[in-house]
């Protein structure tokens, strides 16, 4: 245990995902020794994140306005929607530069063990986006694990009556593999 504030900092950092006690301690002492201006910048960004960042009304991606940057871009192909679990997955697909359509962020995946069912995800919002017929293709890019697969299966079944082209993105592909979609 350290002096009050240092220990408080270590405790707070240790609550972040992926940061164990040793990393928390290392980051805390790094901050103690860092130039005050650098720490002030970090603390301002942390405040801004909670102040200014929200979720896009349409797709659920992170945004600084009612609509995110992608939904607000008229050059994107609005006939295709790529369904992902979390905003970080939007960023991952964007990095491939292979997809020019829009996204839909579910906010998680179906996981009965964690008590997460379809009604806990933004599936109703997805269906309402598909209702006007403007979207002709849905690409399901949930994670390649049990809950991601369960979610993909559920979505494929739910979307089947709509007569859309529904594909399952083979996610977790090695680097260099391009945007291949697999028919399910
Ligand atoms: Zn959006």
Image: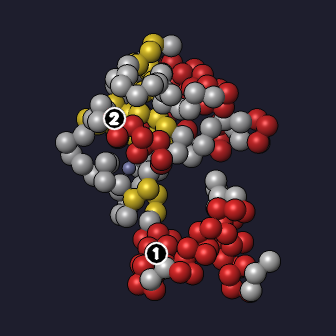
Judge depth for marks 2 and 1 and give the one in front. Answer: 1
The x and y percentages for residue 134 are 31, 32
Q: Quadrant of residue 109?
A: top right
The residue tagged 2 is 96
The x and y percentages for residue 76 are 24, 40
| Residue appearing at x 53%, y 81% in the figure | 33
| Residue appearing at x 41%, y 84% in the figure | 37
In the figure, is residue 153 to the left or right of 94?
right
| Residue appearing at x 56%, y 46% in the figure | 107
The x and y percentages for residue 167 are 44, 20
In the displayed structure, would residue 50 be above or below residue 178?
below
SS category of the residue bearing label 1 = helix
In the figure, is residue 83 to the left or right of 108?
left
Mark 2 and mark 1: span between their CA atoms?
Answer: 29 Å
**Residue 144 can be seen in this image:** yes
User: Can you name the residue that lies furthest to the left here?
Assistant: 75
Q: Judge the density around disc 1: few (<14), some (14-19), many (≥20) Cα neighbours within 10 Å.
A: few
The residue tagged 1 is 42
Q: Looking at this view, is 3 or 164 the one in front?
A: 3
**Residue 125 can be seen in this image:** no
SS category of the residue bearing label 2 = helix
Specify the quadrant that holds the N terminus.
bottom right
Q: Earlier in the sequence, mark 2 or mark 1?
A: 1
């Amino acid at each position: 245990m350290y002096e009050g504030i240092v220990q408080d900092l270590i405790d707070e950092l240790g609550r972040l995902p992926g940061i164990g006690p040793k990393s928390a301690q290392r980051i805390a002492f790094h901050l103690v020794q860092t130039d005050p201006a650098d720490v002030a910048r970090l603390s301002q960004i942390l405040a801004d994140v909670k102040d200014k960042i929200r979720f896009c009304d349409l797709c659920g991606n992170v945004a600084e306005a009612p609509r995110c940057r992608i939904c607000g871009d008229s050059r994107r192909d609005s006939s295709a929607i790529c369904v992902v679990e979390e905003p970080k997955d939007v960023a991952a697909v964007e990095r491939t530069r292979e997809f020019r359509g829009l996204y839909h962020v579910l906010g998680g995946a179906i996981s009965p063990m964690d008590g997460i069912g379809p009604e806990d995800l933004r599936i109703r919002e997805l269906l309402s986006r598909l209702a006007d017929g403007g979207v002709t293709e849905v690409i399901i890019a949930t994670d390649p694990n049990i809950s991601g697969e369960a979610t993909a299966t559920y979505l494929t079944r739910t979307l089947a009556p709509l007569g859309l082209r529904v594909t399952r993105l083979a996610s977790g592909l090695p680097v260099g593999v391009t945007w291949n979609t697999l028919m399910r």
